[in-house]
Amino acid sequence: MEIQLKSKAGNKNMHISVEKLRKSFGSFEAAKDVSFEIEKGKLIGFLGPSGGGKTTILRMLAGLEQPDSGDIFFHGKKVNDLTPQDRHIGFVFQNYALFRHMTVYENIAFGLKVKKKSKQEIKNRVSELLELTGLKGLDNRLPNQLSGGQRQRVAFARALAPEPQLLLLDEPFAAIDAKVRKELRSWLREMINRVGITTIFVTHDQEEAVEVADEIMIINQGRLEQKGSPFNIYKNPETPFVAGFIGESNRLDDIKGLKGFTDGLQNAKAIIRPEFIDIGLEKEISYRSAAEEGTVRNVFFRGTNWQIEVQVGPYKLFGYRSLEQETLKPGDRVCILIHRIYEYNGENALILENKLKYDPLPVHI
């Protein structure tokens, strides 16, 4: 079975529209004809390797960087020439950027005071945000009296206080330890759903993007590689970069000789995700006519499963095996069933299914 990888259509009722955005710093091109649209109220993750252009695009949306060319629209209104204040942006930085001499209350109230809100309006809004962000009772503390997670919540509350129309988060959890980071992900997801504000966050953490975002934009070398739901991007990568970047992968320079994969592109390379591979003893593999034979090279305990490295002819592959199954050890002869692969050649890409899987041999126990 061969499935052509096709791009997805855009959505309607857009809050943000970006058209052919370009930005260079000297000879370095940070954004190359980037175009996308975002629906109101969506939580979007900018995901990609470091230096790929994510933060530059975010800063252009905020008005902190001026694009060399291209246009940015909020609700159909061009905002290229508007200041950050006039764009009604809330911005949260990875280092919190709190005022150290101000209390939690004063930090959250800062933007409201700049807007010359009344004392009662400020009190009501700050009280509402203290409740929303789980900071109630901490309003008189200084930032150095708070944990990292609490300081980041203050930064969120301060950004939300002036009721911005767009919330931008630049690596918001980068300075927080792993356990607290996981807790804050769930909290952020719930908070954004309650507030209903359009939000974009930059991250290089795939797990974070998949767990938090409604949609992900994969950005690499200044280009938007793909935009879609975490599930669709994972299942239907549109470019070789996305196929290799999302999730884990085995990379092969060719797939000559692999059973069930005789069709495909000329001079193609391949990506095989570990979940596409079953590694087991001969009695455990149902589709033996479609399976390769190989030898276990290494076995690594990964907490919830075993990672198994196998040698299959000239190829070194890895997959995972349940702790409930019979334990394998280096040197064991095993069967390796490859269900599917991503094959690519230049700009062309295919998902190939193992054809021999559809002609199973009986299993004898």
Image (cartoon, rainbow, N blue to C red):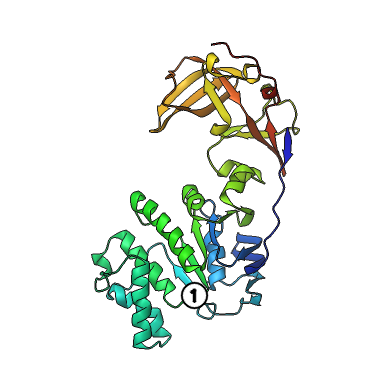
Task: Give the percent coordinates (x, y) of residue 144.
Answer: 25, 66
Location of residue 342 (image quadrant) = top right
**233 shown above or below 135:** above
Q: Determine if residue 174 is in view.
A: no
Observer-nearest of 325 and 164: 325
Task: Give the percent coordinates (x, y) of residue 20.
Answer: 68, 65
Location of residue 10 (image quadrant) = bottom right
Q: Amino acid at mark 1?
A: Pro
**10 shown above or below 82:** above
Q: Which residue is farthest top? A: 364
- Residue at horizontal 53%, vertical 51%? 49
Residue 72 appears left or right of 320: right
Observer-nearest of 170 and 51: 170
Observer-nearest of 158 and 315: 158
The 10 Å Cα crowd at callout 1, few under 14, some 14 to 19, many 20 or more, is some
Residue 62 appears left or right of 68: left
Task: Give the percent coordinates (x, y) of residue 332.
Answer: 48, 14
Task: Give the percent coordinates (x, y) of residue 213.
Answer: 52, 56
- Residue at horizontal 62%, vertical 29%? 339
Residue ID for mark 1:
164
| Screen quadrant of the N terminus | top right
**148 shown above or below 100:** above
Say what secondary structure mark 1 lies in.
Answer: loop
Location of residue 32 (image quadrant) = bottom right
- Residue at horizontal 39%, vertical 51%? 182
Q: Determine if residue 10 is in view.
A: yes
Residue 257 appears left or right of 103: right
User: In the rendered picture of this protein, how many numbered marks are placed on residues?
Assistant: 1
